[in-house]
Image (cartoon, rainbow, N blue to C red):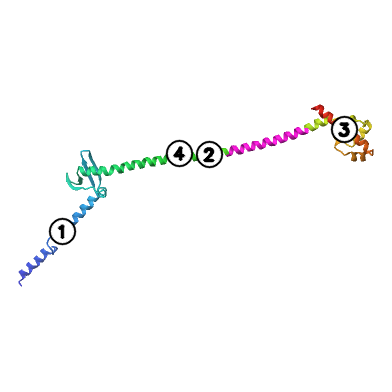
Amino acid sequence: MTEESGEEQKGEVRKNRGEPLVPGLEFLKWICLVSGIVGFITWLGDIVYWSTKGYSIHPVFEATAGGIPYVLLLFAGLLVLGCGASAYEKYLESTSGTLELDSRLDEMEKVMSEIHESLFKTTKKMAEDLKEARRLNEELRAQVEALTRERDRLNARLKRMQERLEYALAPDLREVKGIGPTMAERLKELGLEKVPDLLKISPEDLSAKLGISPKIVSKWFEEAMRLSRERSAGSE
């Protein structure tokens, strides 16, 4: 082999270095790469729907999930996704029900919110009313107890006044037949001045204290009771 042929072989090796062993494989690799990039960009991109009613822009994955067909278009040098009027109408039909449902759900949520707010206000008002009713009940009970105590105090006072009045109006022992001034003084020393005083003690005890006949004392008692009845009848 000559030196010139050796140089030619080296140049041929350098020329073929990096070339694919299978023809067309390198081109296929580039096709796959570009397709992957375009597919990814397409998935992230938007779809332009148009018809006589106008146009709308929506995410690609939304159209894909809804089963709406679309085509890849080259428009004004920009890569966009588009679909015809039929697809646009289909999209409108698919979204109108969802929008109506969302609207109804919003209305229901608003109504439920108003109901909850009204219930909260009603419950709060009832709690406040119950608290106020309990306060008024306690206040009323305290007033009733105070009035009851005052009534009992007044009744006791009236009773004492009535007793003093009755005692003041009661017949004196000197009015009892058989009790003279001297005996009246002796009875006064024993704390007996009026007929009620005499009727509080038993005839036997009084007879023993005075040292006189029980028969005489019994007559005093009979006369004292007669006077007491007459005085009571006259006061009525």
Circles 3 and 2, Cβ within 8 Å, touching? The answer is no
Mark 4, secondary structure of its residue:
helix
Q: Which residue was labeled with disc 1?
A: 28
Mark 1, secondary structure of its residue:
helix
Q: CA distance from mark 4 to mark 1?
A: 69 Å
Question: Residue 44: x, y in percent?
Answer: 25, 50
Residue 128 bears which disc, if any? 2
Q: Is residue 137 above or below residue 36?
A: above
Q: Which residue was labeled with disc 3?
A: 224
In the displayed structure, does residue 218 sit left or right of residue 102?
Answer: right
At x 39%, y 40%, the residue is: 110
- Earlier-in-chain disc, 3 versus 4: 4
Q: CA distance from mark 2 to mark 4?
A: 15 Å
Question: Residue 26: x, y in percent?
Answer: 15, 60
Quick check: is 154 in the magenta stretch?
Answer: yes
Q: Nearer the viewer, residue 74 or 16?
A: 74
Q: How would you rate the neighbour count of disc 1 (Cα within 10 Å): few for under 14, some for 14-19, many for 20 or more? A: few
Q: Is residue 181 visible?
A: yes
Residue 96 bears which disc, if any? none
Question: Residue 203: x, y in percent?
Answer: 89, 38
Residue kind at label 4, given as amino acid type:
Ser
Residue 118 bears which disc, if any? 4
Assign the N terminus to one quadrant of the image.
bottom left
